[in-house]
Image (cartoon, rainbow, N blue to C red):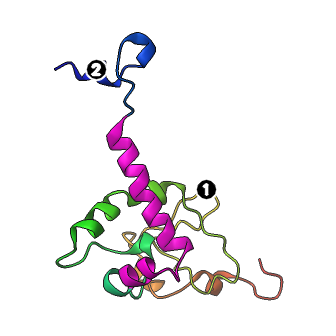
């Protein structure tokens, strides 16, 4: 079967199907977005309790014996991570390491040699609390 013909536009004799794998990733990414923005929804509370009780969706791991649904939602997390940026605010909940808090969306990796000095610190420990700089 000629698969290119299926995804070709209808005006060119194809069936007009879109890239279904990309569409699937976007829909899975939407579930991840809801884990971040709708923390009080039933689904978000269940997944948080089971898979990332002490972290966020962006920093969660697949874990031991994950469900199929969790594995496929985690497969799409790169979409969220590429576009996610922290709004610092007080900085009390944002770890210095492995979080995209820098202005260009980058982060400080825990793989650097001196990371053990700041492992348990948050952004507010770097801030001047008097003038919020």
Q: In x, y percent, where is residue 116?
A: 40, 83
Q: Quadrant of residue 4?
A: top left
**Where the C terminus falls, by quadrant?**
bottom right
Q: Is residue 1 left or right of residue 101?
A: left
Q: Is residue 65 left or right of residue 45?
A: left
Tell whether position 45 is magenta.
yes
Whether residue 42 is situated above or below residue 16 in the rendered picture:
below
Secondary structure, mark 1, is loop
Secondary structure, mark 2, is helix
What residue sits right under mark 2 in the picture? 4
What is the chief secondary structure element of the magenta stretch? helix
Residue at figure coordinates x 69%, y 84% from the top left: 90
What residue sits right under mark 1 in the picture? 104
Q: Residues within 10 Å of mark 2 (few under 14, many from 20)?
A: few
- Span colored in magenta: 19-48
Q: CA distance from mark 1 to mark 2?
A: 38 Å
Residue at figure coordinates x 65%, y 60% from the top left: 103
Tell whether position 85 is magenta.
no
Residue at figure coordinates x 44%, y 70% from the top left: 58
Q: In x, y percent, where is residue 117?
A: 45, 85
Residue at figure coordinates x 34%, y 63% from the top left: 73
Whether residue 83 is situated above or below residue 43 in the rendered picture:
above
Q: Residues within 10 Å of mark 1 (few under 14, many from 20)?
A: few
Q: In x, y percent, where is residue 43?
A: 41, 77
């Amino acid at each position: 079967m000629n698969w290119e013909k299926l995804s070709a536009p209808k005006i060119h004799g194809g069936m007009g199907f879109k890239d279904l794998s990309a569409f699937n990733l976007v829909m899975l990414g939407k579930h991840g977005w809801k884990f971040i923005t709708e923390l009080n929804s039933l689904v978000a509370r269940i997944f948080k309790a089971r898979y990332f009780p002490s972290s966020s969706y962006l920093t969660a791991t697949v874990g031991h014996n994950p469900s199929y649904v969790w594995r496929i939602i985690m497969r799409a997390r790169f979409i969220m991570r590429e576009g996610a940026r922290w709004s610092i605010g007080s900085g009390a909940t944002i770890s210095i390491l492995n979080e995209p808090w820098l202005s260009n969306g980058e982060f400080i990796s825990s793989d650097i040699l001196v990371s053990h000095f700041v492992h348990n610190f948050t952004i507010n420990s770097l801030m001047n609390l008097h003038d919020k700089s």
